[in-house]
Amino acid sequence: MNHQNENPKRPAGPAWISRKNLKLERLLSQSYRKDELLVFYKRKPTEKDVNTIRESFRKAGFKADNIQIGSCGNCDIPVQRWRAKGIHTLLSGNSIRAGSGPAATTVGESYSLNFLNQVPAPSVNELDEGLKRRIEAGRKHNPQHKKHEIVIAVLDTGFDPKLADPQYLWGEAAGTKGEKCYQDVHAGWNFVQDNGNFEDDNPARHGTIVSQYIINQFKHSKTNGVKIMALKTHDRNGVGDLFSIICGINFAIAKGAKIINASWGFYYYFDTPMPYLKTLITGVLRKKGILFVTAAGNQIAADDLIARQIYQAEYGVTLTDDQLRNLAIHNFYPAQLSTATNSVIVATTTDGRTVSATQNYSNKFVELGVMADQFTRLGMDFEVPFEGVVGAFISGSSFATAIASGTIGANCDPALYVPGIQKQAFLQSLKTIGLADGSGNILTDLPPLSKKYVKNGSCLK
């Protein structure tokens, strides 16, 4: 890891904007979708609530008649997406965080910009046609005959059935009477285009690779099988937005997912995360008995530049390369939401002593270091997960996350997924389960990791 000592001063705190700074806010303007605002209500909005907000816009001098309002299917959730030219410019006085809320009791929090998030870029930008042909040729049909079925919702770029076996795709049983939310949808969903085509069009097939890593962990389980709930929340470029994520999480809740795999995230530069997103991930999921497994995050050059400029402006300190990978300094959501009492589990890549120099770490927020398959001077890599492909490697906390989701789902007792779910029960369970080759247990605490990189030094082998 590069411990570049650009400035000997100690960091003073997280990279947050605490006061008005137009230059820094302009830097962040690429972090959200233009011409969109999310409106959060205290309850499911009525027509009167909507008109109250329209009127507040008119009083602010904004032409509100052409606003297009979108919702998450027919889910009874207090969130809408409002689209109109220039609507994102209706901001509160101090930052780009929120809109100018009306003087009404209908709004649960200020309007939010529709923040972007992305799948951490892998070490290769695409699967070339030759490798795709090798994957297709090598794929074998491995029927599942397992006692328990664990549904894992993969919020990502989709699922390519030519590369990954579609038998693992989730589908709702005929005649199922579930919650009202997306009640007419019985397979995966595309939240980017709002339709049923969730096929992976990302050149790197990010969502498909994530799904395959999860599937592979189940192949040696004697009791647990897996169904992948493919939820396309990210476009072909690997970019999603806050609204799609909110809809995807609510879909997963309504359709009975046991684990949500979130191999994505976004750097955020304010002291308070969006209240609804935080409550949804840290509160609602725990009450519903759902684990949320997410990526620690990767190095993104543009975000590192922003963090350095913010830190210099706030504290007069230049962050080192190593400090930029520390989640306590450079906040990456939703990884930053992990606490001891909620059901958020964060994963990064390790060699058992340190973490990848291009991935984030924290002995407070990161629960799992996943042991890489290959260690070189260039980094820590995982073997591409498809049958028939040998000698191809890829890296990223996305894939560490997928391996963690699959390992938990394949090995832990389904009885642990209960309201008030305890993630520590899953981690403790993994520490008692031996590896197939008899070389130790699946999860081991390694002291070198605990000093800085991973909570308790917990490492998946």
Image (cartoon, rainbow, N blue to C red):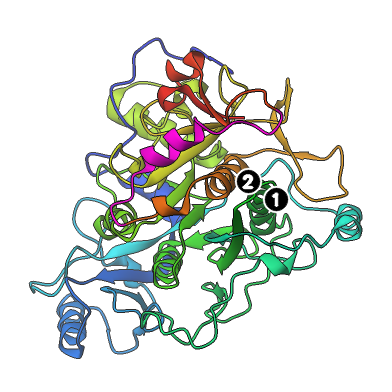
Please check the rendered image and state whether residue 278 is part of the magenta-colored stretch, yes or no: no
Q: Residue at x 62, y 44 (%)?
A: 399
In percent of width and height, residue 293 lies at 47, 48
Q: Which quarter of the figure is the N terminus placed in?
A: top right
Per the rendering, the mark at residue 219 is: 1
In percent of width and height, residue 373 lies at 72, 31
The residue at the far top in this view is: 8
Is residue 124 depicted above or below 114 in this figure?
Answer: above
Q: Which three-letter amino acid code belongs to the residue tagged 1?
A: Lys
Q: Is residue 193 left or right of residue 280?
A: right
Q: Is residue 45 left or right of residue 391?
A: left
Query: In terms of depth relative to the viewer, which is nearer, 196 or 106?
Result: 196
Could you classify mark 1 by the number of other residues whose Cα lies within 10 Å: few (under 14), some (14-19), or many (20 or more)? Answer: some
Q: Are marks 2 and 1 in contact (CB under 8 Å)?
A: no
Residue 337 location, quadrant: top left
Q: Is residue 242 left or right of residue 352?
A: left
Q: Secondary structure at mark 2?
A: loop
Per the rendering, the mark at residue 193 is: none
Q: Residue at x 41, y 23 (%)?
A: 456
Q: Residue at x 80, y 53 (%)?
A: 127
C-alpha separation, residue under disc 2 versus residue under disc 1: 27 Å
Which residues are the magenta region? 419-437
Q: Earlier in the sequence, mark 2 or mark 1?
A: 2
In percent of width and height, residue 185 lies at 51, 83
Residue 225 location, quadrant: bottom right
- The residue under label 2 is 121
Is residue 317 depicted above or below 66 in this figure?
Answer: above
Please check the rendered image and state whether residue 421 is part of the magenta-colored stretch, yes or no: yes
Q: Secondary structure at mark 1?
A: loop
Q: Is residue 409 left or right of residue 81?
A: right
In percent of width and height, residue 386 lies at 79, 50
Q: Which three-letter amino acid code belongs to the residue tagged 2?
A: Ala
